[in-house]
């Protein structure tokens, strides 16, 4: 929901997200269909109902209150997706795409928390999870 950023003030971000999450009710996402960005990333589309978009937009608005937080142009009009293959797949892209292109994954998942990820040792790991206060979609 937010592109990677560097900071020495992660406590500020964590405090903001903790406070934000305490005021949210769960929603849902619908995951369906495969797509790709060029031949470098294969993803599953994420469809968000209005209730989820309200949370996403509110979180973005809150993060923009942090003076040093920058947002790229593509973060304003978000293409929600979950990357399933993205690192060094160019040489095998055609083979992977042909294997999955006719598959139509479709399922609902709860949107009941936000995770702050940290890049460590060449991988993204969950640093902190902020669970929404209550309620279900």
Image (spheres, rainbow, N blue to C red):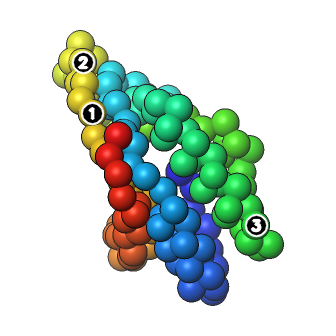
> Can you give x and y, in whole percent of width and height, for residue 53 in the image?
55, 39
Q: Are circles 2 and 1 on residues that touch, CB within 8 Å? A: no
- Label 3 and label 2: CA atoms lie apart by 39 Å
Closest to the observer: 30 or 70?
30
Q: Which mark is residue 104?
A: 2
User: How many residues crowd around disc 2 within 10 Å: few (fewer than 14), some, or many (20 or more)?
Assistant: few
Q: Secondary structure at mark 3?
A: loop
Q: Residue at x 56, y 47 (%)?
A: 56
| Circle nearer the N terminus (3, 2) | 3
- Label 2 and label 1: CA atoms lie apart by 13 Å
Closest to the observer: 48 or 90?
48
Q: Quadrant of the C terminus?
A: top left
Closest to the observer: 123 or 66?
66
11 is higher (above) or lower (below) than 83: below
| Circle nearer the N terminus (3, 1) | 3
User: How many residues crowd around disc 1 within 10 Å: few (fewer than 14), some, or many (20 or more)?
Assistant: few
> Which residue corresponds to mark 3?
65
Q: Residue at x 63, y 52 (%)?
A: 58
49 is higher (above) or lower (below) than 86: above
> Which residue corresponds to mark 1?
108
22 is higher (above) or lower (below) than 86: below
> Can you give x and y, in whole percent of width and height, for residue 64 in the image?
73, 61
Q: Residue furthest right?
A: 67
Q: Secondary structure at mark 1?
A: strand
């Amino acid at each position: 929901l937010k592109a990677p950023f560097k900071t020495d003030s992660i406590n500020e971000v964590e405090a903001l997200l903790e406070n934000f999450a305490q005021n949210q009710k769960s929603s849902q996402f619908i995951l369906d269909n495969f797509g790709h960005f060029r031949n470098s990333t294969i993803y599953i589309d994420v469809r968000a109902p209005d209730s989820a978009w309200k949370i996403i937009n509110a979180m973005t608005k809150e993060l923009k209150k942090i003076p040093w937080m920058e947002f790229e142009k593509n973060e304003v009009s978000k293409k929600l997706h979950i990357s399933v293959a993205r690192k060094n797949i160019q040489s095998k892209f055609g083979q992977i795409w042909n294997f999955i292109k006719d598959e139509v994954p479709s399922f609902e998942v709860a949107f009941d928390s936000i995770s702050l990820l940290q890049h460590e040792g060449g991988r993204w790991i969950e640093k902190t999870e902020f669970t929404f206060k209550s309620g279900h979609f």
